[in-house]
Image (cartoon, rainbow, N blue to C red):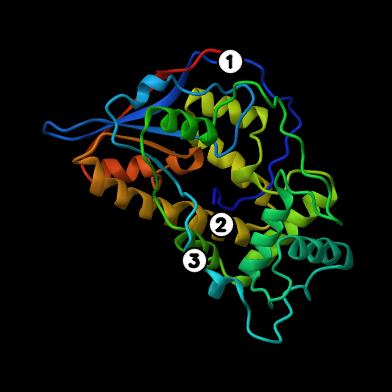
Amino acid sequence: MRWLLLLALLLAASPSRAEPESLAAFRIAPAGREAPASLLIPGSHQPEVGLLPPDPAIFEGRSALLLESVADAEDVSDLLRAPPGFGVLDPFPPAERRLLEAATACARLIHEPLSPLGLFLALLAASQPPAACPGLPAPPASEGSGTASGGDPWLRLLAQRRGVPIQGLETRREMLLALRGMGGDAVLRLVSRMAREMLGGGAAQADLAPLDALMLQALLAGDFDQLRARMLAPMAGDPLLREAFARQMLDARNQVMARRLAARLSRESLVVAIGAAHAAGPRGVVALLRQQGFTVTPVRIPTLRP
């Protein structure tokens, strides 16, 4: 999936139109010995207007592009199905319930009693382009469609053109288990926030929504701590939800990603693309790799000019 999984971020600033000539990234190498260096690019999972893709030369000599996750065929229905008699929609007020019923019908999950995870995925799938579901607001048009814009889709395209394999750092099941670790009540409150944003005409899910202008500025400057703080800011009114989200959807997943990267970085030269919030702070992937003995150096990489 991509994404996994986050909240709406709505700020008043207009999107930046500046096109940077370089992007913030990290060079990773095992400390104290000769080994191939890799490149870690914190970025966005969606195309971002004002964020150009990196120069394709970054894939020269790389053995793979690693993304947070890629589509897999693993059966996760056991995580999406609730016990019989479980009324997942019962806590929601009427307007939100109608929207969620439409989303589950659109996602073809209405025939099963849904778990909170199932409800979350149904709403997420029904709210992202190109979905067009009866009873739901139309997904926002992709601003700047047809123009060069950075993000995971462009990295995928560049890797495919170079014949570089594309692999995932975590499976769909692992991502869902991290979400479930927030607790069913927290997941339902997260779904409620997403539903309210959709009913109000806002973005439904931060990890898959375009970055706001200040987050984009932080990304371009390499200020990933600020970007993480802005991602969590909309949950300030629900401290328990914010803590659960940061613990499970950021910090716990960072541990998994860093562990898997460490197992490969000692022997391969990779391009690694993760959501920018995963690079932030003492529990971020960058800090965890340094703790495991890797030299992680901030660098700027050139972009692909239109």
Q: Earlier in the sequence, mark 2 or mark 1?
A: 1
Q: With respect to residue 31, does 256 lie above or below?
A: below
Q: Are marks 3 and 2 in contact (CB under 8 Å)?
A: no
Q: Are marks 3 and 1 in contact (CB under 8 Å)?
A: no
Mark 3 nearby-residue class (10 Å; few <14, some 14–19, many ≥20): some
The label shown at residue 19 is 1
What type is the residue that disc 1 sits on?
Glu
Q: Secondary structure at mark 3?
A: helix
Q: With respect to residue 104, does 148 lie above or below?
A: above
Residue 243, percent across and down? 55, 58
Residue 72, percent across and down? 47, 56
What type is the residue that disc 3 sits on?
Leu
Q: Earlier in the sequence, mark 3 or mark 1?
A: 1
Q: Quadrant of residue 188?
A: bottom right
**Which quadrant of the rendered structure holds the C terminus?**
top right
Q: Earlier in the sequence, mark 3 or mark 2?
A: 3
The label shown at residue 273 is none
- Foreground label between 2 and 1: 1
Label 2, on which residue?
245
Q: Seen in the image, is 142 located left or right of residue 267?
A: right
Q: Secondary structure at mark 2?
A: helix
- Alpha carbon of mark 3 to alpha carbon of mark 1: how far? 38 Å
Label 3, on which residue?
177
Residue 237, percent across and down? 70, 54
Q: Quadrant of residue 266?
A: top left
Residue at point 52%, 54% (across, down): 246
What type is the residue that disc 2 sits on?
Phe
Q: Seen in the image, is 81 located left or right of residue 73?
A: right
Residue sitting farthest toward the bottom: 85
Residue 232, percent across and down? 60, 47
